[in-house]
Image (cartoon, helix red, strand yellow):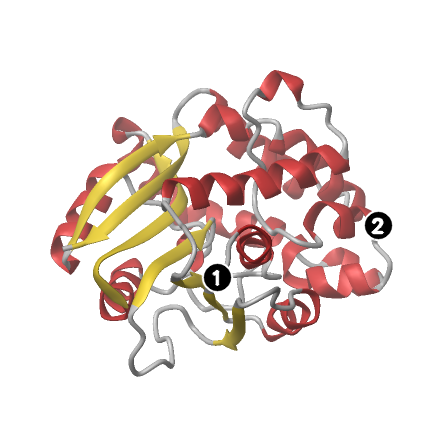
């Protein structure tokens, strides 16, 4: 357990859960992303409340993606299959495909999420920028709080364009720096990424973690890859109760000053409005 506790928190999350880490199991046993509170003032700071809020973030993504019965849906960076589990519980006759680069996470997803009714579910270990599917006319493609760790946003958008039907939707949530702050953030990004990696992990890629881009850059990316940015929903305030819970869990597991300061720093610039938590919905033209 000592080696596990000294590693970045999310790198060995399946091991933490399997070794009996109750906090990890409650907070991140299903969803590996931030929480969404419709009324942030009602957040009570408990692990159970955070787990419900994480489920609600998936629900918010599904709402904005306008998901309904009888669709084919691909979830890139699917983690433990939490969003696929939500879809499986609430819709019928879906073809659900989860993609994740981490074999341990995929194996846990396969154990946890079994198809209900006439739904179909499959999980594939793969890089989201090189999905090993020759032809898939998907109606929706989701990326829930993971695109910042992909090797290339442009390659991922190109894959999304290849796999989606005309009129299909790509829905993501990401951390976006404010327009005036984007250049400052990208200047400091490489300098602070070592601390971010020590805190959250490397996402098992060679690319620096937490590479953020602005809304203007997303508009340019969409235009260059055949998408139209249709919807922008800022849910920053709804996610803020995440930070004290996550910081408490991670610093208890590994009380390094770097971990505490990194999460506190992200919380601070989010509260100040310098960094937004945004849901973006793109349509394949």
Which residue is found at the position 71% from the left and 64% from the top?
14
Tell me the tag on residue 77. 1
Q: Position of residue 26 (x, y in %)?
A: 76, 47
Q: Position of residue 201 (x, y in %)?
A: 58, 57
Asked if disc 2 and disc 1 are in contact, CB closer than 8 Å, the reply is: no
Q: Is residue 246 visible?
A: no
Quadrant where the C terminus sits is bottom left
Q: Which residue is mark 2?
A: 22
Who is closer to the viewer here, 65 or 127? 65
Q: Secondary structure at mark 1?
A: loop
Q: Is residue 123 visible?
A: yes
Q: Is residue 77 above or below residue 131?
A: above
Which residue is found at the position 30% from the left and 35% from the top?
232
Q: Secondary structure at mark 2?
A: helix
Q: Position of residue 212 (x, y in %)?
A: 36, 45
Tell me the tag on residue 175. none
Q: Residues within 10 Å of mark 1 (few under 14, many from 20)?
A: many
Which residue is found at the position 40% from the left and 44% from the top?
174
Q: Residues within 10 Å of mark 2 (few under 14, many from 20)?
A: some
Q: Is residue 198 above or below residue 116?
A: above
Image side of residue 143 versus residue 102, left or right: left
Which residue is found at the position 16% from the left and 59% from the top?
225
Q: Toward which corner of the image does residue 30 lie, by quadrant?
A: bottom right
Who is closer to the viewer here, 256 or 31? 31
**Of marks 2 and 1, which one's residue comes earlier in the chain?**
2
What separation in Å lies between label 2 and label 1 (alpha carbons)? 24 Å
Image side of residue 10 versus residue 253, left or right: left
Q: Is residue 79 above or below residue 144?
A: below
């Amino acid at each position: 357990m000592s080696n596990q506790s000294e590693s970045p928190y999310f790198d060995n999350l399946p091991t933490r859960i399997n070794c009996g880490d109750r906090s990890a199991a409650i907070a991140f046993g299903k969803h590996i992303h931030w929480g969404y509170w419709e009324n942030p003032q009602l957040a009570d700071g408990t692990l159970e409340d955070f787990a419900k809020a994480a489920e609600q973030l998936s629900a918010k993504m599904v709402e904005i993606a306008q998901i309904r019965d009888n669709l084919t849906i691909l979830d890139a960076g699917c983690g433990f299959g939490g969003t696929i589990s939500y879809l499986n519980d609430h819709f019928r006759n879906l073809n659900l495909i989860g993609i994740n680069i981490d074999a341990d996470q995929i194996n846990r997803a396969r154990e946890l999420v079994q198809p209900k009714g006439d739904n179909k579910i499959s999980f594939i270990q793969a890089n989201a920028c090189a999905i090993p599917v020759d032809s898939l006319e998907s109606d929706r493609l989701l990326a829930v709080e993971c695109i910042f760790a992909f090797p290339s946003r442009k390659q991922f958008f190109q894959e999304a364009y290849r796999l989606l039907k005309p009129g299909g939707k790509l829905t993501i949530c990401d951390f976006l720096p404010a327009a005036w702050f984007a250049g400052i953030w990208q200047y400091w990004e490489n300098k602070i990424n070592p601390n971010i990696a020590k805190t959250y992990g490397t996402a098992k890629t060679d690319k620096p973690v937490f590479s953020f881009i602005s809304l203007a850059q997303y508009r340019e990316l969409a235009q260059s890859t055949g998408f139209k940015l249709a919807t922008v929903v800022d849910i920053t305030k709804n996610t803020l109760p995440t930070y004290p819970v996550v910081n408490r869990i991670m610093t208890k597991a590994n009380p390094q000053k770097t971990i505490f300061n990194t999460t506190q720093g992200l919380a601070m610039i989010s509260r100040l409005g310098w960094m937004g938590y945004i849901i973006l919905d793109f349509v394949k033209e």
